[in-house]
Amino acid sequence: MGFAARPLPLLLLLLVAGAAATDQIFTTSGVPFGKNSREPRYRVEFHPVDSPYHPENGQESEPMTDHEGRQYTCYLPVEETKTMKSIVPQNATNVIIESERKVKPKEPDELLEVLKDQCFYRHEGWWSYEFCYYGKIRQVHVENEKVIQEYVLGEYDPDATDAYHDNHTSESADEDHVKDTSKRYHVHVYTNGTVCDLTDIPRYTEVRFVCSEPTVLISSIKEISSCKYVLTVQSPMLCKNP
């Protein structure tokens, strides 16, 4: 047998559905509902086994015993604080933090995509250099706004770039390129430049993108061997990559 309880603004317990007014319903702790009870007062409705009570949303069950030892199941309104606890789990913060940890960081090429279709320049003594992302690298000498000498130091080669990354892991940038030697760099390979007079091999350049603030620029270019170059590009967007 079960019964339902609904809160009423009464100070006394009213028993209905054939129950005697002198009957007492005991909580599981053995304390009866009554004038001196600290338990909340409810209007009680008894439901026989053949006509069971169907609890509504927002109610919880509580086993109780009357003074004769008969067992009942009482349905009581759920306190608002309990309802909120069920909605917001205690580990909600941990779940959010764990989700943030699972966010995959962007690859260097994704971060460098903002450089697409852009060219950058550097002047060193006799020579000026032009580097175009996904394009060419040129070495030129200009007089009176006219190009007197020009060499192509390479064109972007996606296959050679992939091969480089297949055979190398990211390395620390050279001390000559950045002050902090612990910083890493990302490489693009530029091949098939102007044929070298000394080696009869097309010029080749390794472009190194390093994390460095505050703006994008060619920080250095060096010829490490005959017609082979290393060009370093200061790339603040790479600083977003852990």
Image (cartoon, rainbow, N blue to C red):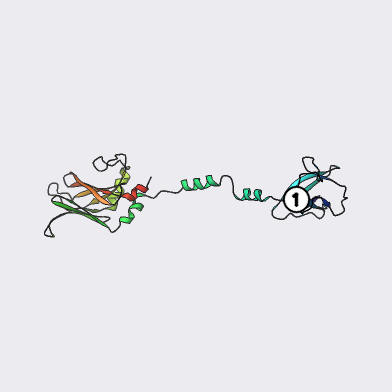
Say which of 39 and 51 sits in front.
39
The percent coordinates of residue 117 (x first, y second) are 28, 59
For image coordinates 74% across by 50% down, the residue present is 76
Expressed as whole percent of the image width and height from the top left, the position of residue 240 reads 37, 48
Left or right: where 179 falls relative to 225: right
Q: In this view of the protein, which residue sits in the foreground, 58 or 155?
A: 58
Q: Nearer the viewer, residue 101 or 202?
A: 101
Inspect the image, locate mark 1, and give the three-letter code of the amino acid beneath it.
Answer: Tyr
Residue at position x 35%, y 47% in the image: 239
Q: Is residue 89 left or right of residue 157?
A: right
Picture coordinates of residue 122 (x, y %)?
A: 20, 52
- Identity of the residue drawn at 35% across and 52% down: 111
Q: Position of residue 55 (x, y in %)?
A: 74, 54
Label 1 element class: strand
Q: Is residue 105 above or below residue 135?
A: above
What residue is disc 1 on? 75
On the rendered image, what quadrant is the C terminus found in? top left
User: Which residue is at a point 25% across and 57% down the rendered structure image?
Assistant: 119
